[in-house]
Amino acid sequence: MNRRHLVTLKDIARELGISVATVSRALRDTYDVSEETKNSVLTKVKELNYRPNFNAMGLVNHKSHNIAVILPTITNYYFSTVITGIQYTAYKNAYNIILHVTGESPEREITIAKELPLSSIDGVLVSVTSESNKCDHLQEIIDNGVPVVFFDRVAESIKTSKVMQNDYEGAFTAVEHLIKRGYRKIAHISGPFSLAFTKERLRGYLTALKKHKIPFNQNWVIHSEFNQESGGADTYKLLSMRDRPDAIFAVNDRKAVGAILTLKKKGIRIGQEIGVIGFTNDPVSAIISPSLTTVEEPASAIGEKSCELLLKHISKKDFIPEEVILKGKLIARESTSRTS
Amino acid sequence: MNRRHLVTLKDIARELGISVATVSRALRDTYDVSEETKNSVLTKVKELNYRPNFNAMGLVNHKSHNIAVILPTITNYYFSTVITGIQYTAYKNAYNIILHVTGESPEREITIAKELPLSSIDGVLVSVTSESNKCDHLQEIIDNGVPVVFFDRVAESIKTSKVMQNDYEGAFTAVEHLIKRGYRKIAHISGPFSLAFTKERLRGYLTALKKHKIPFNQNWVIHSEFNQESGGADTYKLLSMRDRPDAIFAVNDRKAVGAILTLKKKGIRIGQEIGVIGFTNDPVSAIISPSLTTVEEPASAIGEKSCELLLKHISKKDFIPEEVILKGKLIARESTSRTS
DNA sequence: TAAAATATCGAGAACGTTATCGCAGTTTTA
DNA sequence: TAAAACTGCGATAACGTTCTCGATATTTTA
C-alpha cells in the first residue's frame, strides 16, 4: 500500500504518453481535445481512481466549492432542519458545507468570523447569535469580496441577501387565533430583544391586540432566553401576578413547552383556563399533552432558499441583494381549545 | 474595494522589504528568524489582516485541517448532539468539519464516499446507514491512507477505531429494569437488522430474559425502521396479538414515543397495563406524558471521543485501532411505574 | 588570528491544477 | 494553389505556500 500518494494528472499523463494540459482539458470540456484521447483519459481516470485535488484547483481558480455555515446551535429541530435543507441544495450543486457552531456566544461568533479562511470558502451562510454587538466581523467578510447570506436571525444593519419566515405575520396570526378563541388577556413570553425576529414577533403581537382593541399590558411581555427553562420561569412569573393573563403566546415552541409543563405542574387546565400557542412546529408540539397549537416555520425551505441565493451570489458577483420572506402556517391543536 | 485580492505572504514581504520565506518562517516558529523581524512581520500581519491560504498550505503540506463527517441524518437529538461534540473538539484543535448527510440512503453514502476529495481531507468520521451493503467504499478511503473512525453505527467488517455506547449492557439494564418492576411478557420493537447496534441491543434483551428464566417469544421481536411511525405501527401489531405482551422495550426513544402515543390512543394505561422503555434519553422523553423511562446515551461524549481519536490517528499515521465503549445510564420515569 | 560554528536570511524548487500562448498538421477558403 | 482558418496538443507560467540549500555576517573557538 502506497503511503498516501494520491493519483494526479501527471500520473495519468505519463501512463498515456500525453501532456498534463491535455489531461486537464479532457476532464473538463471536450473543447480542444479529440474524442479519442478524451475517452482514453476517462477510462484511465476510472482505472486509477483519480480524484481531483481541490487544493490545487482552489489555488488556481480562486474557487473552493466550500461554503461556511455559521449558526448558534444545531441541537434543535429548527436549525437541524435548516441545515438539512442547506446540505440538500449544496450537495446538488457540488458544494460542501463547513459547519461552525457558535453555541449562542457572540465572542465565539466573532472569532470564527475573524479566522474564516476566506481563500478556501466561496460564500457564507449566517444566522447571528445576537445583533447587539455590532456585526463588523461579518461586514468584513463581505468587504473581502466573499458573499454572505443571512437566514432566520438576520443582521438588519448589513446590506445583503436575507431569508426568513414572516415573523410579523406569523405572530399576528397566532395572537389573532387566540383572540378568536375568546382569550383576552394575552401574555407574550419573548426572546432576547437584540434579535430582529424577536422584535418582529412582538410587533405582530401588538398589532393583533390593537386591531381587536385589546389593551396592552406591559407586564405581560417578558424577554428572556430561548430555552425551555426560561419558558417555565416566565410562566411562573405570569402566574404570580395579581392580574393574571388567560393566554400565553410563546416566541417559540421550546418556551411554550416550558410553559405547558409549568402550567401542568400548577394544576392549571391548559386550553380551558389558559391557552398556549408556540412558534416553529417542533415535532414535540404534537407529542406533548395537551398538544401545542403553533405556527409552522418553513425550516427546510429556508435552508434551501438561502443556499440557492448564496450560490447565485457566488456565480454572479454583482448579484443584487434579495430579501425572501416565507410564510408560516397556523396549526391548531389542543392547547388553545377551550372546550375539551 | 479591491476585487477580492486577499493579502498574501508576498504582500507582507514586499512591504517589509524581506523575502517570502522569512515571512513564512516568522509566522510559524521563531526558529531561524530574529525577534525583531518576527515582530515586524506580526504587526504587519495584523495591519493588513492577513489570513493564510489554506489551499496553498494544503497543497504543500498535504494537510487540510478538514475532517469529513458522514452520517445518516442530523434532525434528531442524538446525532445533532454528537455533531456538537465533534465540532467542539475539532474547533479546539483548529480543525473544520465538513458535513455530509446521507439521509439514510446507502447509495448516497457510497456516492459521497467515492467523491470525497481525499486530498483536502485529513480524516473521516462515519456513522453508516446500513451494514448490509458491503463497506468497500469506506475501506477504500482507508486504503488511500486517510484515517477513518466510526461512531455509533459502526461497520463490523472494517478494522479501524470505533466509538460507541455499550448497547448490549444498556439493553440488558433496560430489560432487567422491566423485569424488576414485575413485567414478564416483554416485547422488543427493534431497528433494521443490518446494523451492529441493533443486534447488540437484541442480544442484551435476550440475555436479560435468559438470566431471569423468562421464555423468549419470537413474535414479540419486531424489526422495522427507526422512526416514530414505525414505533406506532409495531405497537399496533403487538396489541392485536392473541398473546399480548405487558411491556415494550423500544430500540430508541423515537419508537418508544410512537408506542406511547398508540397506547394512549387505544386507552391503555401506560405503566400499569403496559410498561414502555426507550433508549437515548431524547429530551422528548421527559416531556411526553407519561414521561418515558429510558437509557441515556452519552451522545456528546461519543462525538468528542471519536473526534479525539481521529485526530490522534491523523497525527500518528501508525496509530493502533482502538474501540471505545461508553456506558449509558438508566433513567427511570413514569412509563415503567406500575403504581401511580 | 585564522578557522569553525552560529544566526539570520534569500533564491528557487515543489505541491497539483488551470490558463495562455504557440506550434505543428489538416482542412477550408478564394 | 497559396492563404487562411481550424484542430489537437505541448510548454510554460501562474496560484500561495513550505522546504531545501546556500550565502552572508557575526560570534565563538583554539
Image (cartoon, coloured by chain):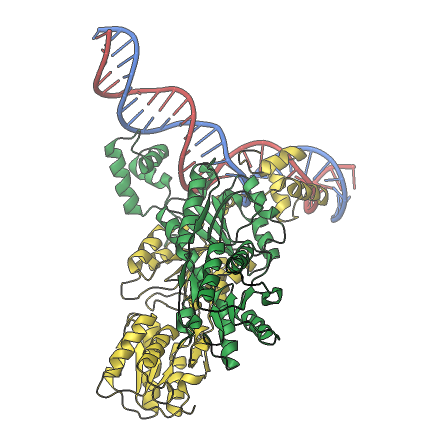
Chain colours: A yellow, B green, C blue, D red
Q: Which residue is pictured at 58% across the width and 44% down the height? A: B139
Residue B224, can we see it?
no
Residue A27 seen in the figure: yes
Q: Along the horizontal axis of the image, is A113 left or right of A286?
A: left
Q: Depth check: give the residue in front, C25 or A179.
A: A179
Position of B80 relative to B148 (above/below): below
Which one is in front, B304 or B143?
B304
- Quarter of the view holding residue A240: bottom left
Residue A222 vs B71, above or below: the answer is below
Q: Place residue A151 in its image quadrant.
A: bottom left
Q: Among all residues in the image, which is located at the extreme front?
A: B213
Residue A247 x %, y %: 33, 86
Q: Position of residue A16 (x, y in %)?
A: 67, 35
Query: Residue B65 at x, y = what percent?
Result: 43, 45
Q: Is residue B111 above or below residue A166?
A: above
Q: Is residue A62 above or below residue A109?
A: above
- Between residue B263 and residue B42, name the one nearer to us: B263
Quarter of the image with the C terminus of chain A is bottom left
Q: Residue B60's spot in the image, x, y percent?
A: 46, 37
The count of marks equals 0
**The N terminus of chain A appears in which quarter of the rendering?**
top right
Q: Does residue B338 appear left or right of residue A30 in this picture?
A: left
- Residue located at (38% from left, 62% from top): A73
